[in-house]
Amino acid sequence: MKYTKEDIRQFKSRGMKSEAVDAQLADFQKGFTPVTLSEPATVGNGILRIAPEEEERLTAVYEEAGATADIVKMVPASGSASRMFKDLFAFADSYRGTVEEFLELVQQKQPGSMHDFFLKINELPFYTRLSDIIWKDGKSIERMIEKREFNEILKYILTKKGLNYGNTPKALVDFHIYRDFVRTAFDEHLVEGALYAGSGKKVQIHFTVAEEYLPLFQARLRKVTKVFEKMFGVKYEVTFSFQKPSTDQVSVDTDGNLLRDEKGEIVFHPGGHGALIYNLNELKADLIFIKNIDNVIPDRAKGDTVKYKKLLAGVLLETRRKIFDYLALLDKKPTEEQLREIENFLPLLGYREAPGKTHKDNKGRIKHLREILDRPVRVCGMVKNEGEPGGSPLWVNMPDGSTRLMIIESAQVNREDKGQVQCFNRSTHFNPVDIVCSTKNRKGKQYDLEEFIAAEQGFITRKSHKGKEILVRELPGLWNGAMANWNTLFVEVPLTTFTPVKTVFDLFRFEHRNVLKKI
């Protein structure tokens, strides 16, 4: 495709080449081939269940290594809170305060309704701040509710008139009330880091954020760092990064034409969370924990979270030690018995050999085994599926006849193939983004994570741009296609480790209510 000088300038400013855009446009033409599912991963068939008698040993494995290992906790935190408050935005757009609308509102008393929201608004963690802002304007939130000024209250929550949560990172929304403090999701991740991701007294946490919000994160960090360092006797090293502009994606209209704005400039969109594989690639650490920003819980209930993070890390370290031992063995002259032992170990890494696969000689066999073993390792927590959305653990058929464990989203499945849909729907667990990674080889050298991306697992999604439907290309998801070719272990963890705040109504749930009341 021919590009203008302005197009080339746009590419250069993003660190992109025109060939990369050509490749993106080609994907719109050919699309992405859905994955071919073999069977769901279940407990005993791809998902490990840690026996109670193993817990103490695995925890000790991690705690012993953690005393000297270089550990980083990575938190994707670039999302705005606007989606969290989408129901409030929708209500403000449609509610005009007529008698009929009010009567309809008060009849909706179920949890998650706007009537329930205003009825319990004083229980929200940001209520005190909201009330103070309104009071400074000479008003009372209680009186505003009596006068049915609901939209005005929402303006104080969503706009610059008040909390401005409609244009704030979700990470910086008040989540939990404590006796003398209200913590944001950002704060809770700092606390978690001190509880399970420290090395000695050093706690390294890396947040991926939207560049425009960086000053807000830095301001919050300055406010809370000394408090938590004193509380937990640690020293924080907090770093930030942004999604790389070179991972931005072009879009097309429904006729396949490259989308441009009114000035004729190409419209780019972020590449989705798959872009963060490039941020992860720059983290130089022995162990990396990955967890979503909104999956946090008050201190009173953090026990299972801390326990299972250590257990997942223990499983990883023990598995990695075995991988390194086998790689060292392959460098020598392994016996037939030793080669069979290594081959029997591969399914524990989420890899099943193609049926009937043979090799010319032992040299080819050893080379193949080394290729399978010598790659990044991840251990992913899996919770029982009780209707929550999330990627599912499945065995996936590969082009060479082998089968790999992967985390698959519904968008990657051929919806026209009933057998594939049924296979996906039979999944018993889902991934809450609870991952521990090892990204170094046995000699301590960092893997280039780009080499293990399954580029064919990208997405084409339909979105709206200025009222018109468009097609947007997204990169393979961070824990989906971006890690598809890693060695993978799935471990069952309890549902108590998954307590996300997807909407403002989740803050009313018991999981996010602290026993202590704010004074």
Image: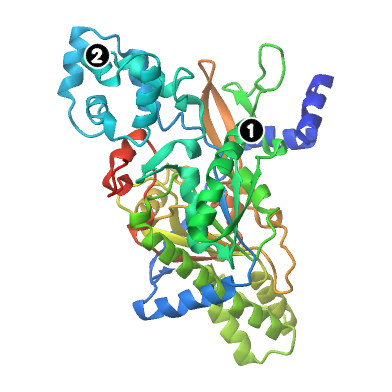
Q: In this view, does 206 lie to the left or right of 496?
A: right
Q: Quadrant of residue 70?
A: bottom right
Residue at x 27% of width, y 46% of height? 510
Image quadrant holding the C terminus, namely top left
Residue at 18%, 10% in the rendered image: 100
* Residue at the spot of label 1: 29
Residue 91: give x, y in percent of width and height: 33, 19
Q: Position of residue 60 (x, y in %)?
A: 49, 77
The quadrant in which the N terminus is found is top right
In the image: residue 39, left or right of residue 122: right
- Dot 1 surroundings within 10 Å: few (below 14), some, or many (20 or more)? few
Front: mark 1 or 2: 2
Q: Could one spot residue 36 in this view of the protein?
A: no
Query: What label sits on residue 329 in the rendered view?
Result: none
* SS at circle 1: helix
Residue sitting at the far right? 5
Q: How many marks?
A: 2
Q: Which of the two labelled residues, at mark 1 and mark 2, occupies the earlier sequence position?
A: 1
- Residue visible at 61% across and 51% down? 482
Q: Mark 2 points at which residue?
A: 148
Residue occupying image coordinates x 40% and y 76%: 55
Residue 232 percent across, percent down from the top left: 49, 59
Amino acid type at image mark 2: Arg
Cα separation between marks 1 and 2: 53 Å
Q: Name the amino acid type tagged 1.
A: Gln
